[in-house]
Image (tube, rainbow, N blue to C red):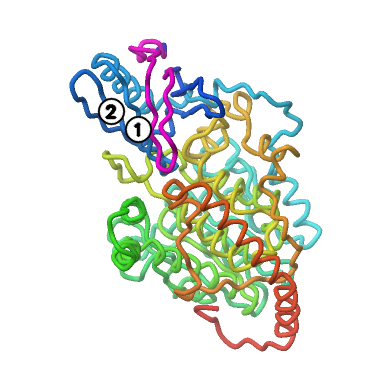
Amino acid sequence: MEFAELIKTPRVDKVVLHRPFHPPVGGTLCLTGHHLILSSRQDNSEELWLLHSNIDSIEKRFVGSSGTITIKCKDLRIIQLEITGMDESINIASSIEALSTLDTISLMYPFFYRPMFEVTEDGWHAFLPEQEFELLSSETDEWQLSYVNKDFTVCPSYPPIVIVPKSIDDESLRKVAAFRQGGRFPVLSYFHRKNGMVMMRSSQPLTGTNNRRCKEDEKLINATLRPGKRGYIIDTRTLNVAQQARARGGGFEQEAYYPQWRRIHKSIERFNILQESLIKLVEACNDQSHNMDRWLSKVEASNWLSHIKEILTTACLAAQCIDREGASVLVHGSEGMDSTLQVTSLAQIILDPKCRTIRGFEALIEKEWLQAGHPFRYRCAQSAYSNSKQKWEAPTFLLFLDCVWQILRQFPCSFQFNERFLITLFEHAYASQFGSFLCNDEYERCKLKVQQKTLSLWSWMNQPTELHKFTNPLFEANGLVIWPSVAPQSLQLWEGVFLRWNRPSKYLEDAYAEMIHIIEYNKELQIKVNALRRQLAELETEDGILETP
């Protein structure tokens, strides 16, 4: 298929662009196979370059011989185009609709993008299992690299190489995979160097109503325990939801077969509930008609911050089991592709200072999201404005980034990266010129040769000319475990994402300057607090798991 077939009118003059808090800009509108471009000849007027893949929905209104097209984007901005001429308006609108709904991956922009900068780093090697295993081997000899999934036949959503207990052979892994939904058998997610405890992740066991068991699964999970130690299975579903899953062939680990493990059920929502929450939140943020009380009520009614609290609470629980209880942890929900990855990723940010550095965080995204099989193509197909919602769409990754921002806000000196870094990841997860977030899993990326045919996002972000934009000037390496507060007063709306298009840019600049001033003023206090925390950690005696830190 040729893009030219979808572009009925490639160029229109005398188009006026309207954006909140910006003066109208007149210019020439051009449509290419991947971009909507508005170019103005006015002095000091920036061009608009909008990827078609960033368009969530469009609304058309035709009056007389002209038309207005409202474009709502996946990065949550809203723009309006005033076009003179009925035919031109109709043609532009239909072309944008056709180009923005293409779902053939090989026709997407990353396969056509050619960088204007010198590529000095191969971002596709931000995380290599072999390198991770080499570091692990210097600490313990109880684990091994497994190539059982090298051809993706055991688990299509897993990478070709995984880390599993050394005592488990490939044939056992195949049997365990048959016992876990989607073949997602338990694999190593994190090794805690402080005490040798581990965190593993998987999907739910297929126990069904007849309490089916798998001795190889029991052996694999027990192989992660030290002699005399117990472990914790953190199920991200409520007990009621987990029991309902049994009727559909799923289920959870029976205590009789896993006596050394204590199962804890949490309540992290998924799919349409999260999608509806995002829609309500964005609707509230765009509504300028209410007074402050009504506006706050609408934000609260979206339940977005409640989801943030539940995810952070569960991640803290996992971290506490490992660090304070000295116990290993297995995390899973149903498929193990959404809430499971939120929890394992955030727990590592809490526990591991390396994950709070730029490259460490990039490696975490690669390992716990991209290679772990989070289906970005499905989850990020639409954002908050689309009228055609599918059951597999959900802002899972955006919620994770929001949780990271909440921790960054509470520990502003402990992260090497800044808010802009997180916002950039959000934008590129939904629409990008880079191939990092394409497809649902490594199997799809291999089939399409994504690494060979596209550029990694990290290759661009890690350039020195770009890297300084994402670097936190207040960063001081903090080797401590950090415990975020999940109290309601500690969690705030992420204005940098949800209000950035609804505030004048001058306001945001002033707010950022004020924030830097306050943080710098309190930096010395932060250092003293960290010193106190060290002293408390040495004196602390733990007896039992704290549900909230």
Q: Which residues are magenta?
A: 3-30
Query: For this rendering, which residue is in front, 64 or 297?
Result: 64
Q: Quadrant of residue 467?
A: top right
Residue 392 appears at what percent x and percent y?
Answer: 35, 45
Query: For this rendering, which residue is in front, 470 or 520?
Result: 520
Q: Amino acid at mark 2?
A: Thr
Q: Give the residue pinned by disc 2.
A: 68
Q: Amino acid at mark 1?
A: Gln
Query: Label for residue 80?
Result: 1
Query: For this rendering, which residue is in front, 445 or 77?
Result: 77
In the depicted structure, whether residue 543 falls above or below residue 486: below
Residue 5 falls within the magenta-colored stretch: yes
In the depicted structure, whether residue 247 falls above or below residue 29: below
Query: For this rendering, which residue is in front, 277 or 258?
Result: 277
In the depicted structure, whether residue 285 falls above or below residue 159: below
**Seen from this angle, which residue lies furthest left?**
64
Residue 156 appears at what percent x and percent y?
Answer: 49, 40
